[in-house]
Image (tube, rainbow, N blue to C red):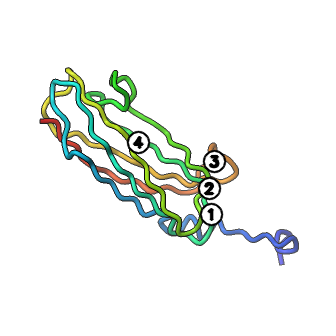
Amino acid sequence: MGLLDMFGKRDVSAELTKKVPYALKLSFHPFRVSANRSDSATMKIELRNLSKEPLLTSVVVKIPKKLGLDQTCLSQAREIRLGELAPGDDKELNVEIYSSTKTDAAEYPVEVTAISHYRNYAYVLNSEKKRGVIRAV
């Protein structure tokens, strides 16, 4: 019997780091953006907590330099803090991806990482990464 067992607390860190904490799904609407023009597409992120414990959650989106997460295309990374996600709970996010006059016609990788934290957002417990592709035509 450990010290934490006396106070009714249990250590769940071992089981949370072994399994995948989230189900992550990406979709783009429309499927592509215009090359060499100002245009935008919406990336829909669907996130589900697969663990049996509530998780402090954040999502990090990274895109290449030819695209942007704002209309000026100066921001290529964004962290979205979701707070505590209950067990089995779903969350949907919409992130706008912008093209500009410097966007060439090509396929661009998009990386989305869902991170589970403990204590606060400075401490990482586990994460799940998903990659997608958006086309500029």
Query: Where does the N terminus fall, quadrant-wise?
Result: bottom right
Image spot of residue 72 (x, y percent):
34, 21
Q: Amino acid at mark 3?
A: Tyr
| Pick the front one: 102 or 33 | 33
Image spot of residue 81 (x, y percent):
55, 44
Say whether marks 2 and 1 touch (CB < 8 Å). Answer: yes
**Residue 61 circle label:** 4
The quarter of the displayed image where residue 101 is located: top left
Q: Amino acid at mark 1?
A: Pro
Which residue corresponds to the image point at 67% horizontal and 69% vertical from the top-left?
12
According to the picture, the residue beneath numbered tag 3 turns out to be: 123
**Gap in angstroms between the C-alphas marked 3 and 4:** 18 Å
Image spot of residue 10 (x, y percent):
75, 71
Q: Earlier in the sequence, mark 3 or mark 2?
A: 2
**Gap in angstroms between the C-alphas marked 4 and 2:** 19 Å
According to the picture, the residue beneath numbered tag 2 turns out to be: 84
The quarter of the displayed image where residue 64 is located: top left
